[in-house]
Image (spheres, helix red, strand yellow):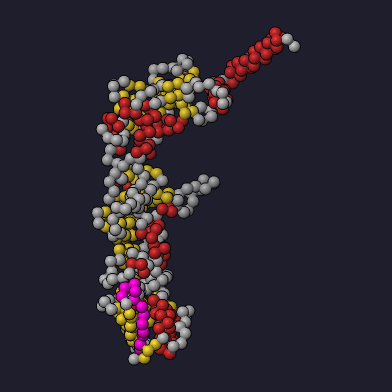
């Protein structure tokens, strides 16, 4: 086949293809016309040899953007550039006084200063409506520091949704701009708020002070405080640096309590619902009478977290799921956070914690080498005198006597271990007992500190415990039965039973 004949055949094929395309455009309407144009651009963009059809609409320095007024379905907002604000970061007029997400806000100035279209979709479009530009989804008006002004309309997304159609006000030239460069123009002002309620811990974070949890479903407050102690303890032997002071005094399990105690630091919301909320807004989100109030205070800080109504997701049938996935909250004591936030339920342990979740299994915490004697009154009237050598971390148990009799040191250590594990978990109790204590245990330390455990009859199977004069626990009486047997065992040099 000669070259001339090849040319005729190829030309015929191209004409046929063009004819088919014209027929499609004629009979399928505007929507397919726009889609065809978009698909054509996608094919070109996927090719490694595709020509660059981009159009630079604005080419300025970020500092030259003085103001951008945005209008969208949420109302809009006014962006002020770095030069206009005189600061290192840009701002949002309507969010004055609030902490901002600096990166999101600064992106507005960056993207408008260097506004670039992927390509020209149609020059001199006779019908802007087919691109959604007669009733735009959003618009933005830019004012530069030299006084120049530019205004743009954002229409529909292209069929592949990677681009949006954009035109400049007063122009019929339609461009396709990557949707990621325009995303900020669709957002409500809440989108630009800093959603971190309290900043994460740093080396300068002050010492733990006091954490109080008040909930509607509890008839008592749960309070934690730094344990400064009334007598010296070795920090390396402490279970936790904090203790529970209400509803009872209790030492804390360091593993289970740490996340709760320091949860406020770095607490971040999923979403900002309302800025500068009014009384009606607080009522709408259940924050006028919150379900939970958490106060975290100390030297130089006093944070109050209020937790209101829950947010419930829906299942596939459109039914509301019973368990809340998030809660609406406010924070006081942090500058620039006058907002209602939506916080993931998993980030709010205050809503479900009970004392038994975090307290230690030890009712008292006295290192054996700090103890001078352990005395019993009631069912037993024994006194165990303890002798030690050395001081502090170097102290060692030298001997134990009871009624002048030398006892086996190893056996007494096992007995003391049983005594310290007087059961606490799931036994929190506040109602004062009646009558007299049937057994009183005093752990008296060398520095004058004492822990006094008083046991009162409750039922045949339960006893009520007062720790240092404060009703604190209800325990199984069989622990007491085992204690009495172990007192006799330690005096006789017999094995101590830890089970009861």
On screen, 336 above or below 51?
below
* Residue 88 visible in this rendered orientation of the protein: yes
Q: How many marks?
A: 0
- Please say whether residue 190 is one of the residues in the magenta stretch: no
Q: Residue 326, how many percent across, how many down?
A: 42, 50
Residue at 41% across, 77% down: 417
Residue 338 percent across, percent down from the top left: 30, 45
Question: Which residue, as the protein is rendered here, is positioned at the far left?
Answer: 300
Hey, which quadrant is residue 493 in on the image?
bottom left
Residue visible at 33% across and 85% down in the picture: 385
Give the camera-side residue of 207 and 347.
Answer: 207
The answer to whether residue 455 is visible is no
Horizontal arrangement in the rendering, residue 447 relative to residue 216 (left or right): left
- 460 or 99, which is in the foreground? 99
Residue 88 lies in what quarter of the image? top left
Q: Residue at x 28, y 22 (%)?
A: 146
Residue at 36% across, 85% down: 400
Q: Quadrant of the N terminus?
A: top right
The quarter holding residue 166 reads: top left
In this view, the residue farthest toward the top is 4
Depth check: 135 or 484 in front? 484
Percent coordinates x, y for residue 396 in the rendering? 36, 78
Residue located farthest toward the right when viewing the structure as drawn: 1
Q: Identify whether 95 is placed above or below 144.
A: below
Is residue 392 in the magenta section?
yes
For the record, the magenta segment spans 391-402
Q: Residue 256 at x, y = what percent?
A: 41, 63
């Amino acid at each position: 086949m000669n070259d001339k004949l090849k040319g005729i055949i190829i030309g015929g094929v191209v004409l046929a293809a063009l004819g088919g395309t014209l027929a499609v455009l004629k009979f399928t309407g505007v929507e397919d016309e726009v889609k065809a144009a978009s698909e054509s651009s996608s094919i070109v963009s996927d090719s490694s040899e595709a020509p660059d059809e981009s159009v630079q609409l604005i080419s300025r320095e970020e500092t030259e953007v003085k103001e951008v007024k945005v209008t969208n379905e949420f109302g809009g907002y006014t962006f002020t550039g770095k030069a206009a604000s005189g600061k290192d970061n840009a701002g949002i007029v309507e969010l004055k006084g609030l902490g901002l997400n600096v990166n999101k806000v600064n992106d507005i100035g960056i993207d408008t200063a260097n506004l670039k279209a992927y390509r020209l979709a149609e020059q001199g479009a006779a019908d802007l409506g087919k691109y959604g530009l007669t009733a735009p989804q959003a618009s933005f008006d830019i004012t530069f520091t030299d006084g120049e002004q530019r205004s743009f309309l954002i229409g529909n997304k292209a069929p592949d949704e990677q681009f949006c159609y954009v035109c400049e006000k007063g122009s019929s030239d339609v461009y396709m701009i990557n949707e990621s460069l325009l995303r900020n123009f669709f957002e409500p002002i809440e989108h630009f708020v800093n959603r971190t309620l309290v900043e994460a811990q740093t080396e300068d974070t002050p010492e733990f002070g006091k954490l109080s949890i008040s909930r509607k479903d509890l008839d008592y407050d749960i309070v934690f405080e730094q344990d400064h102690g009334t007598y010296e303890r070795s920090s390396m032997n402490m279970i936790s640096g904090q203790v529970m002071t209400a509803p009872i005094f209790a030492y804390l399990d360091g593993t289970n309590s740490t996340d709760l105690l320091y949860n406020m630091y770095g607490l971040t919301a999923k979403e900002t619902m309302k800025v500068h909320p009014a009384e009606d807004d607080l009522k709408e989100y259940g924050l006028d009478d919150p379900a939970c109030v958490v106060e975290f205070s100390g030297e130089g800080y006093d944070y109050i977290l209020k937790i209101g109504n829950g947010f419930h997701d829906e299942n596939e049938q459109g039914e509301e799921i019973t368990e809340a996935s998030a809660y609406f909250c406010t924070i006081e004591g942090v500058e620039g956070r006058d907002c209602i936030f939506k916080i993931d339920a998993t980030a709010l342990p205050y809503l479900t914690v009970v004392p038994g979740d975090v307290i230690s299994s030890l009712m008292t915490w006295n290192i054996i080498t700090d103890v001078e004697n352990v005395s019993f009154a009631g069912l037993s009237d024994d006194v165990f005198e303890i002798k030690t050598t050395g001081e502090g971390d170097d102290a060692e148990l030298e001997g134990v006597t009871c009624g002048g009799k030398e006892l086996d040191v190893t056996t007494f250590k096992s007995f003391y271990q049983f005594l310290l594990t007087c059961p606490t978990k799931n036994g929190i109790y506040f109602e004062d007992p009646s009558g007299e204590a049937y057994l009183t245990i005093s752990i008296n330390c060398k520095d004058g500190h004492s822990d006094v455990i008083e046991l009162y009859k409750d039922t045949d199977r339960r006893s009520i415990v007062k720790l240092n004069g404060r009703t604190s626990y209800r325990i199984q009486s069989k622990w007491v039965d085992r204690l009495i047997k172990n007192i006799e065992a330690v005096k006789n040099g017999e094995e101590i039973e830890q089970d009861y």
